[in-house]
């Protein structure tokens, strides 16, 4: 559209186009068993080639827990040789938060992609936890401005949240997720079988994200979580599947239908509890995992909501009981650490969070169960009171 700008800025041509993104999210088991067609179908879903060049990247922690995984994947690829052509053997990439510590792993992954001469139609398959997938997603989105990425998440948190969305990133400049891109995956395959080797911490992590999204969006799911948190902690398979599916779908719905998939506005409802969670991870030098930090962050913000009349005392208590029944903490002494002037170090999380969002501070607080409200200020007194309350509870 070309028009003469009445304000005197001359001739303006307004560029405008729309790009549609779509990707399947499969929930399955045995993705690398010889008879499974899921991965081969996802890779070939565009029908734009007969044979697809692929590179499989495996999380180092996962590889340790599953020593036969790399040969199993090679056998799978060999069996599907009519449609899958490996650019090289599976590569092991660092797992856990170390993967996101600066640019080292991103550079090494890019160098590997370059050496194997992958092109924009090649498909990288990432099998691992949320941290490794965040790092890999960034590298893959940068190589030739973006290759195809199929994510196969292997922790509860990655399956119900981190892998199904459009964000990736690494920690830099002393800030979590400072460097990253928005890059939707080519496909996601959630394979519940991988979960059985998870350490207790990584087992319960996903439950925190489920409580997060349930408390602000889905009251029946919140009830379900409160009733089944102990079964989740006891690794009941049916409960685990139900929680992961519902949590993943709620995240997908928010991204697909919430009107701001690439977060250009400043509201970030799915980051309920996260302004403090990211700061807690940072202050604890990542001793506290993301899911555990989110659980403490939810309890803090829910208590602030309680103090401001947004949430009833009974609902706050249900949240805390649900989190703890599920094996999650609502307290760590690092949240009351102070600087020389006696100020809470946790408060630095607010400014970091605002910077990350852009614009004004937007904090999502729950309103009852299943609804939310954005607030633009958090009163330091309310934060202090919430910390005291959580200390007493612990
Ligand atoms: N991109 C997003 O939208 C998004 C959303 C939420 C969280 N995240 C990020 O995800 C990260 C946390 O992810 P996480 O909770 O998956 O933790 P993680 O990736 O750190 O994995 C935890 C540990 O488990 C190991 N592991 C992975 N799968 C395993 C398995 N099946 N058996 C045994 N060990 C296994 C890993 O090597 C690691 O040591 C954080 O960095 C967080 O910021 C990203
Ligand atoms: Zn999170």
Image (cartoon, grey):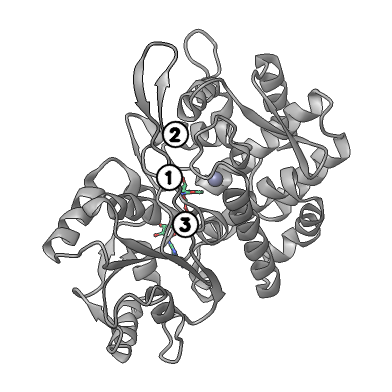
Query: Which image quadrant: the N terminus?
Result: top left
The residue that label 1 is drawn on is 17
Residue 394, compared with residue 85, is above or below; it is above
Q: Which residue corresponds to the image point at 58% horizontal and 39% vertical from the top-left?
A: 271
**Front residue of this view, candidates 224 and 265:** 265
Which quadrant of the picture is home to ligand 2?
top right
Residue 85, compared with residue 309, is above or below; it is below
Tell which circle, 3 or 2, labels the residue nearer the N-terminal end: 3
The residue that label 2 is drawn on is 282
Q: CA distance from mark 2 to mark 1?
A: 39 Å
The residue that label 3 is drawn on is 21
- Sort mark 1 into few (<14), some (14-19) or many (20+) by Cα contacts within 10 Å: few
In the picture, residue 17 is in which quadrant?
top left
Q: Which residue corresponds to the image point at 20% horizontal and 54% vertical from the top-left?
A: 110
Q: Picture coordinates of residue 193 (x, y %)?
A: 52, 76
Q: Residue furthest top?
A: 341
Is label 3 or label 2 in front?
A: 3
- Sort mark 3 into few (<14), some (14-19) or many (20+) by Cα contacts within 10 Å: few
Query: Which image quadrant: the C terminus?
Result: top right
Circle 3: element type: loop
Q: Is residue 87 left or right of residue 66?
A: left
Numbered-mark total: 3
- Sort mark 2 into few (<14), some (14-19) or many (20+) by Cα contacts within 10 Å: some
Q: Is mark 3 within 8 Å of ligand 1?
A: no
In the picture, residue 231 is in which quadrant?
bottom right
Q: Is mark 2 within 8 Å of ligand 1?
A: no
Q: CA distance from mark 3 to mark 2?
A: 33 Å
Q: Picture coordinates of residue 281 (x, y %)?
A: 48, 38
């Amino acid at each position: 559209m070309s028009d003469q700008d009445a304000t005197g800025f001359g001739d303006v041509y307004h560029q405008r186009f729309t790009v549609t993104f779509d990707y399947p999210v499969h929930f399955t088991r045995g993705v690398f068993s010889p008879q499974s067609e899921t991965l081969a179908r996802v890779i070939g879903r565009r029908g734009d080639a007969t044979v697809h060049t692929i590179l499989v990247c495996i999380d180092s922690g996962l590889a340790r827990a599953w020593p036969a995984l790399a040969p199993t994947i090679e056998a799978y690829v060999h069996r599907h040789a009519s449609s899958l052509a490996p650019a090289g053997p599976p590569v092991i990439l660092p797992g856990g938060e170390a993967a996101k510590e600066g640019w080292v792993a991103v550079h090494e992954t890019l160098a590997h992609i370059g050496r194997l001469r992958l092109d924009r139609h090649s498909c990288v398959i990432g099998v691992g936890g949320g941290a490794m997938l965040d790092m890999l997603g960034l590298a893959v989105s940068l190589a030739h401005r973006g290759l195809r990425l199929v994510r196969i998440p292997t922790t509860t948190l990655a399956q119900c949240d981190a892998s199904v969305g459009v964000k990736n990133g690494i920690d830099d400049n002393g800030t979590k997720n400072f460097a990253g891109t928005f890059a939707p995956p080519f496909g996601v395959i959630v394979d519940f079988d991988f979960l059985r080797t998870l350490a207790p911490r990584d087992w319960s992590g996903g439950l925190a994200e489920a409580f997060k999204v349930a408390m602000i969006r889905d009251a029946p799911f919140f009830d379900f979580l409160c009733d089944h948190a102990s079964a989740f902690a006891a690794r009941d398979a049916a409960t685990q599947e139900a929680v992961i599916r519902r949590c993943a779908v709620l995240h997908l719905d928010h991204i697909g239908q919430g009107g701001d998939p690439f977060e250009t506005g400043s509201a970030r409802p799915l980051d309920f509890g996260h302004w403090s969670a990211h700061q807690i991870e940072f202050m604890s030098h990542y001793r506290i995992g993301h899911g555990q930090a989110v659980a403490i962050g939810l309890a803090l913000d829910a208590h602030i909501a309680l103090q401001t009349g947004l949430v009833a005392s009974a609902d706050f208590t249900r949240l805390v009981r649900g989190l703890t029944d599920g094996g999650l903490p609502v307290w760590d002494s690092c949240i009351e650490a102070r600087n020389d002037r006696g100020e809470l170090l946790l408060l630095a999380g607010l400014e970091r969070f605002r910077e990350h969002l852009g614009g004004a501070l937007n904090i999502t607080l729950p309103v009852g169960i299943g609804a939310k409200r954005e607030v633009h200020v958090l009163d330091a007194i309310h934060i202090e009171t919430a910390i005291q309350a959580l200390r007493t509870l612990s």
